[in-house]
Image (cartoon, rainbow, N blue to C red):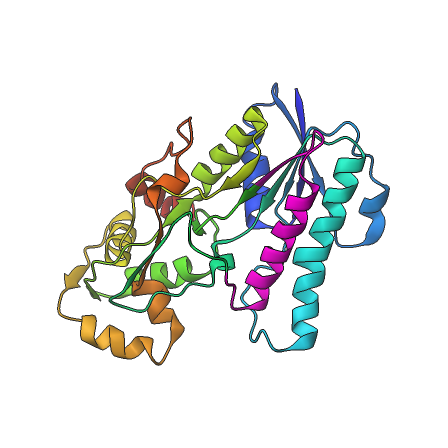
Amino acid sequence: MKRILITGTQGYIGGSLANYLNRWPEKYRVDFLSLRDGTWKQADFEPVDAIVHAAAIVHQPKSKDDPDEADVYDRVNHRLTAELAQKAKAEGVSQFLFLSSESVYGLHAPVGKTLTITADTPLHPTDNYGISKRKAEEDLDLLRGDGFRVAILRPPMIYGRGCKGNYQTLAHLAKKLPIFPEIANRRSMLYIDNLCEFLRLLIEDGADGLFCPQNAEYVSTSRMVREIAKAHGKHICLVGGCAWALKLLSHVTALAGKAFGSLCYDQSLSDYPQNYNLVSFEQSIAETEGGA
Protein backbone atom coordinates (compact mmCIF):
# COMPACT_ATOMS: atom_id res chain seq x y z
CA MET A 1 0.00 0.00 0.00
CA LYS A 2 1.27 3.46 -0.92
CA ARG A 3 0.87 6.30 1.54
CA ILE A 4 0.02 9.54 -0.26
CA LEU A 5 0.14 12.96 1.38
CA ILE A 6 -1.83 15.73 -0.33
CA THR A 7 -1.52 19.44 0.42
CA GLY A 8 -4.34 21.87 -0.25
CA THR A 9 -7.01 20.61 2.14
CA GLN A 10 -9.55 23.13 0.86
CA GLY A 11 -8.48 23.06 -2.78
CA TYR A 12 -10.35 21.70 -5.77
CA ILE A 13 -7.55 19.50 -7.12
CA GLY A 14 -6.44 18.16 -3.75
CA GLY A 15 -9.95 17.23 -2.66
CA SER A 16 -10.79 15.68 -6.02
CA LEU A 17 -7.60 13.59 -6.03
CA ALA A 18 -8.26 12.30 -2.52
CA ASN A 19 -11.77 11.22 -3.49
CA TYR A 20 -10.43 9.58 -6.64
CA LEU A 21 -7.68 7.61 -4.90
CA ASN A 22 -10.10 6.48 -2.21
CA ARG A 23 -11.70 4.26 -4.83
CA TRP A 24 -8.76 1.91 -4.18
CA PRO A 25 -8.58 1.70 -0.37
CA GLU A 26 -6.49 -1.45 -0.63
CA LYS A 27 -3.81 0.34 -2.70
CA TYR A 28 -3.61 3.87 -1.30
CA ARG A 29 -3.73 5.47 2.09
CA VAL A 30 -4.49 9.15 1.57
CA ASP A 31 -3.86 11.87 4.14
CA PHE A 32 -4.05 15.64 3.97
CA LEU A 33 -1.41 18.07 5.14
CA SER A 34 -2.39 21.64 5.95
CA LEU A 35 0.25 24.29 5.33
CA ARG A 36 -1.77 27.16 6.77
CA ASP A 37 0.47 27.44 9.82
CA GLY A 38 3.85 26.12 10.85
CA THR A 39 2.62 22.93 12.52
CA TRP A 40 3.28 20.93 9.34
CA LYS A 41 7.00 21.26 10.03
CA GLN A 42 6.59 18.80 12.93
CA ALA A 43 4.86 16.19 10.76
CA ASP A 44 6.65 12.88 10.26
CA PHE A 45 7.22 12.26 6.55
CA GLU A 46 9.21 9.04 6.90
CA PRO A 47 6.24 6.69 6.27
CA VAL A 48 5.14 8.73 3.21
CA ASP A 49 5.75 7.40 -0.30
CA ALA A 50 4.64 10.42 -2.31
CA ILE A 51 3.57 14.00 -1.68
CA VAL A 52 1.19 15.72 -4.08
CA HIS A 53 1.62 19.44 -3.58
CA ALA A 54 -1.58 21.11 -4.80
CA ALA A 55 -1.81 23.94 -2.26
CA ALA A 56 -1.37 27.38 -3.82
CA ILE A 57 -2.81 30.81 -4.27
CA VAL A 58 -4.55 30.22 -7.58
CA HIS A 59 -6.57 33.30 -8.54
CA GLN A 60 -4.87 35.66 -10.92
CA PRO A 61 -3.09 38.62 -9.33
CA LYS A 62 -3.81 42.22 -10.30
CA SER A 63 -0.29 43.40 -11.05
CA LYS A 64 3.15 41.87 -11.11
CA ASP A 65 4.51 45.26 -10.02
CA ASP A 66 2.76 45.30 -6.62
CA PRO A 67 5.57 44.38 -4.16
CA ASP A 68 3.23 43.25 -1.38
CA GLU A 69 1.18 41.08 -3.69
CA ALA A 70 4.31 39.66 -5.30
CA ASP A 71 5.67 38.66 -1.90
CA VAL A 72 2.47 36.82 -0.95
CA TYR A 73 2.56 34.76 -4.14
CA ASP A 74 6.28 34.12 -3.80
CA ARG A 75 5.97 33.10 -0.15
CA VAL A 76 3.12 30.63 -0.71
CA ASN A 77 3.68 29.30 -4.21
CA HIS A 78 7.47 29.40 -4.31
CA ARG A 79 9.24 29.48 -0.95
CA LEU A 80 6.75 27.24 0.85
CA THR A 81 6.98 24.71 -1.98
CA ALA A 82 10.77 24.62 -1.74
CA GLU A 83 10.68 24.27 2.04
CA LEU A 84 8.17 21.43 1.86
CA ALA A 85 10.22 19.59 -0.77
CA GLN A 86 13.44 20.00 1.22
CA LYS A 87 11.80 18.42 4.26
CA ALA A 88 10.36 15.63 2.11
CA LYS A 89 13.75 14.78 0.64
CA ALA A 90 15.50 14.93 4.00
CA GLU A 91 12.99 12.51 5.53
CA GLY A 92 13.10 9.94 2.75
CA VAL A 93 9.99 10.65 0.68
CA SER A 94 10.72 9.11 -2.70
CA GLN A 95 8.47 11.22 -4.93
CA PHE A 96 7.24 14.82 -4.95
CA LEU A 97 4.50 15.80 -7.40
CA PHE A 98 4.04 19.52 -7.96
CA LEU A 99 1.04 21.17 -9.59
CA SER A 100 2.53 24.02 -11.55
CA SER A 101 0.65 25.79 -14.33
CA GLU A 102 0.47 26.65 -18.00
CA SER A 103 0.89 30.24 -16.75
CA VAL A 104 4.67 29.78 -16.57
CA TYR A 105 4.73 30.35 -20.33
CA GLY A 106 3.00 33.71 -20.01
CA LEU A 107 1.10 33.23 -23.27
CA HIS A 108 -2.24 34.83 -24.11
CA ALA A 109 -3.66 34.14 -27.55
CA PRO A 110 -5.76 36.92 -29.08
CA VAL A 111 -8.87 36.06 -31.07
CA GLY A 112 -7.91 34.79 -34.51
CA LYS A 113 -4.38 33.72 -33.58
CA THR A 114 -3.16 30.24 -32.63
CA LEU A 115 -0.35 29.72 -30.14
CA THR A 116 0.93 26.17 -29.73
CA ILE A 117 3.20 25.35 -26.80
CA THR A 118 6.02 22.99 -27.76
CA ALA A 119 9.10 21.63 -26.03
CA ASP A 120 10.99 24.69 -27.32
CA THR A 121 8.55 27.31 -26.01
CA PRO A 122 10.41 29.52 -23.51
CA LEU A 123 9.13 30.29 -20.04
CA HIS A 124 8.16 33.92 -19.72
CA PRO A 125 5.53 34.35 -16.98
CA THR A 126 3.84 37.74 -16.98
CA ASP A 127 2.09 37.81 -13.61
CA ASN A 128 2.95 37.06 -10.00
CA TYR A 129 1.19 33.70 -10.09
CA GLY A 130 3.18 32.43 -13.06
CA ILE A 131 6.43 33.93 -11.76
CA SER A 132 6.03 32.20 -8.39
CA LYS A 133 5.29 28.86 -10.06
CA ARG A 134 8.35 29.15 -12.28
CA LYS A 135 10.59 29.90 -9.29
CA ALA A 136 9.19 26.87 -7.48
CA GLU A 137 9.96 24.67 -10.49
CA GLU A 138 13.55 25.93 -10.56
CA ASP A 139 14.10 25.08 -6.89
CA LEU A 140 12.53 21.65 -7.31
CA ASP A 141 14.85 20.91 -10.23
CA LEU A 142 17.80 21.57 -7.92
CA LEU A 143 16.45 19.09 -5.35
CA ARG A 144 15.86 16.29 -7.85
CA GLY A 145 18.20 13.32 -7.52
CA ASP A 146 19.71 11.05 -4.85
CA GLY A 147 16.56 8.93 -4.81
CA PHE A 148 14.23 11.95 -4.76
CA ARG A 149 12.02 12.01 -7.84
CA VAL A 150 10.19 15.20 -8.81
CA ALA A 151 7.20 15.25 -11.16
CA ILE A 152 6.23 18.75 -12.29
CA LEU A 153 2.85 19.16 -13.98
CA ARG A 154 1.80 22.14 -16.08
CA PRO A 155 -1.89 21.49 -16.72
CA PRO A 156 -4.07 23.71 -18.89
CA MET A 157 -7.51 24.85 -17.74
CA ILE A 158 -8.98 22.24 -15.41
CA TYR A 159 -12.73 21.73 -15.22
CA GLY A 160 -15.17 19.35 -13.60
CA ARG A 161 -17.84 19.08 -10.94
CA GLY A 162 -17.62 22.03 -8.57
CA CYS A 163 -14.88 23.84 -10.46
CA LYS A 164 -14.58 27.61 -10.50
CA GLY A 165 -13.23 30.19 -12.93
CA ASN A 166 -13.87 30.74 -16.62
CA TYR A 167 -15.71 27.45 -17.07
CA GLN A 168 -18.50 28.61 -14.79
CA THR A 169 -18.80 31.87 -16.72
CA LEU A 170 -19.27 29.96 -19.97
CA ALA A 171 -21.65 27.49 -18.32
CA HIS A 172 -23.81 30.37 -17.12
CA LEU A 173 -23.95 31.79 -20.65
CA ALA A 174 -24.74 28.38 -22.15
CA LYS A 175 -27.75 28.02 -19.89
CA LYS A 176 -29.07 31.53 -20.55
CA LEU A 177 -28.32 32.48 -24.16
CA PRO A 178 -30.28 31.21 -27.19
CA ILE A 179 -27.36 31.99 -29.54
CA PHE A 180 -23.58 31.99 -29.22
CA PRO A 181 -20.69 32.93 -31.54
CA GLU A 182 -19.28 30.08 -33.62
CA ILE A 183 -15.51 30.40 -33.54
CA ALA A 184 -13.16 27.61 -34.66
CA ASN A 185 -10.56 28.14 -31.93
CA ARG A 186 -8.55 25.41 -30.20
CA ARG A 187 -7.96 25.14 -26.48
CA SER A 188 -6.15 22.58 -24.37
CA MET A 189 -8.29 21.57 -21.42
CA LEU A 190 -8.15 18.82 -18.81
CA TYR A 191 -11.07 17.14 -17.09
CA ILE A 192 -10.49 16.69 -13.36
CA ASP A 193 -10.93 12.90 -13.42
CA ASN A 194 -8.42 12.60 -16.26
CA LEU A 195 -5.97 14.69 -14.24
CA CYS A 196 -6.54 12.49 -11.19
CA GLU A 197 -5.92 9.34 -13.23
CA PHE A 198 -2.74 10.91 -14.62
CA LEU A 199 -1.52 11.68 -11.11
CA ARG A 200 -2.36 8.13 -10.04
CA LEU A 201 -0.30 6.71 -12.90
CA LEU A 202 2.64 8.98 -12.05
CA ILE A 203 2.51 7.73 -8.47
CA GLU A 204 2.29 4.10 -9.56
CA ASP A 205 5.24 4.55 -11.92
CA GLY A 206 7.31 6.66 -9.52
CA ALA A 207 7.65 9.07 -12.42
CA ASP A 208 10.16 11.91 -12.58
CA GLY A 209 10.22 14.82 -15.01
CA LEU A 210 8.06 17.48 -16.63
CA PHE A 211 4.52 16.66 -17.74
CA CYS A 212 1.87 18.62 -19.64
CA PRO A 213 -1.31 16.52 -19.50
CA GLN A 214 -4.40 17.46 -21.46
CA ASN A 215 -7.57 15.92 -22.81
CA ALA A 216 -7.21 13.66 -25.84
CA GLU A 217 -8.62 16.33 -28.16
CA TYR A 218 -8.57 20.10 -28.44
CA VAL A 219 -11.81 21.90 -27.72
CA SER A 220 -13.40 24.96 -29.27
CA THR A 221 -15.26 27.32 -26.98
CA SER A 222 -18.34 27.12 -29.18
CA ARG A 223 -18.41 23.34 -28.97
CA MET A 224 -18.02 23.44 -25.21
CA VAL A 225 -20.92 25.85 -24.81
CA ARG A 226 -23.06 23.69 -27.09
CA GLU A 227 -22.28 20.56 -25.03
CA ILE A 228 -23.07 22.39 -21.77
CA ALA A 229 -26.42 23.51 -23.17
CA LYS A 230 -27.09 19.97 -24.38
CA ALA A 231 -26.45 18.60 -20.89
CA HIS A 232 -29.29 20.80 -19.67
CA GLY A 233 -31.67 19.76 -22.43
CA LYS A 234 -31.22 23.01 -24.34
CA HIS A 235 -30.35 23.74 -27.94
CA ILE A 236 -28.11 26.72 -28.54
CA CYS A 237 -27.73 28.18 -32.00
CA LEU A 238 -24.14 28.85 -33.06
CA VAL A 239 -23.84 31.94 -35.24
CA GLY A 240 -20.90 32.52 -37.58
CA GLY A 241 -19.46 35.81 -38.76
CA CYS A 242 -18.69 37.12 -35.27
CA ALA A 243 -14.91 36.97 -35.42
CA TRP A 244 -14.49 40.68 -36.16
CA ALA A 245 -16.56 41.66 -33.12
CA LEU A 246 -14.67 39.29 -30.84
CA LYS A 247 -11.33 40.59 -32.11
CA LEU A 248 -12.48 44.10 -31.26
CA LEU A 249 -13.71 42.95 -27.86
CA SER A 250 -10.38 41.25 -27.15
CA HIS A 251 -8.72 44.67 -27.16
CA VAL A 252 -11.08 45.77 -24.40
CA THR A 253 -11.16 42.70 -22.14
CA ALA A 254 -8.73 39.81 -21.68
CA LEU A 255 -11.67 37.43 -21.13
CA ALA A 256 -12.48 37.42 -24.86
CA GLY A 257 -8.96 36.27 -25.67
CA LYS A 258 -9.03 33.62 -22.96
CA ALA A 259 -12.36 32.32 -24.20
CA PHE A 260 -11.96 32.56 -27.98
CA GLY A 261 -8.21 32.64 -28.63
CA SER A 262 -6.37 29.44 -29.58
CA LEU A 263 -3.83 28.32 -26.98
CA CYS A 264 -2.88 24.68 -26.80
CA TYR A 265 -0.15 22.21 -26.00
CA ASP A 266 1.35 20.25 -28.85
CA GLN A 267 -0.09 16.77 -28.43
CA SER A 268 3.40 15.25 -28.27
CA LEU A 269 3.99 17.01 -24.92
CA SER A 270 1.07 15.12 -23.42
CA ASP A 271 1.95 11.59 -24.51
CA TYR A 272 2.27 9.01 -21.74
CA PRO A 273 2.82 5.24 -21.99
CA GLN A 274 -0.52 4.57 -20.33
CA ASN A 275 -3.90 6.07 -21.16
CA TYR A 276 -5.10 8.61 -18.63
CA ASN A 277 -7.91 10.09 -20.71
CA LEU A 278 -10.55 7.72 -19.44
CA VAL A 279 -13.41 10.18 -19.90
CA SER A 280 -14.28 11.65 -23.31
CA PHE A 281 -14.98 15.35 -23.70
CA GLU A 282 -18.72 14.85 -24.22
CA GLN A 283 -18.99 12.60 -21.17
CA SER A 284 -16.90 14.98 -19.07
CA ILE A 285 -19.31 17.85 -19.75
CA ALA A 286 -22.30 15.62 -18.96
CA GLU A 287 -20.69 14.57 -15.67
CA THR A 288 -19.68 18.14 -14.82
CA GLU A 289 -23.13 19.55 -15.40
CA GLY A 290 -24.90 16.55 -13.90
CA GLY A 291 -22.91 17.00 -10.68
CA ALA A 292 -23.31 20.78 -10.55
Q: Is residue 122 left or right of residue 24?
A: left
- In reply to whether residue 215 is colored magenta, the answer given is no
Q: Residue at x 29, y 78 (%)?
A: 249
Q: How many marks?
A: 0
Q: Nearer the viewer, residue 292 or 226?
A: 226
Q: Nearer the viewer, residue 93 or 38?
A: 93
Q: Residue at x 27, y 65 (%)?
A: 113
Q: Residue at x 40, y 57 (%)?
A: 167
Estimate the x, y position of residue 24 in percent, counting from the top left.
56, 23
Hey, which quadrant is residue 172 in on the image?
Answer: bottom left
**Image vertical order of residue 70 relative to residue 54, above or below:** below
Range of magenta residues: 124-151
Estimate the x, y position of residue 97 in percent, counting from the top left.
61, 39
Q: Is residue 178 left or right of residue 219?
A: left
Outermost residue on the front side: it is: 120
Q: Nearer the viewer, residue 231 or 267?
A: 267
**Image vertical order of residue 203 relative to residue 159, above or below:** above
- In reply to whether residue 149 is colored magenta, the answer given is yes
**Image vertical order of residue 151 relative to residue 240, above or below:** above
Estimate the x, y position of residue 64 in percent, counting from the top left.
58, 73
Q: Residue at x 55, y 49 (%)?
A: 12
Which quadrant holds the N terminus?
top right
Q: Is residue 175 left or right of residue 96?
A: left
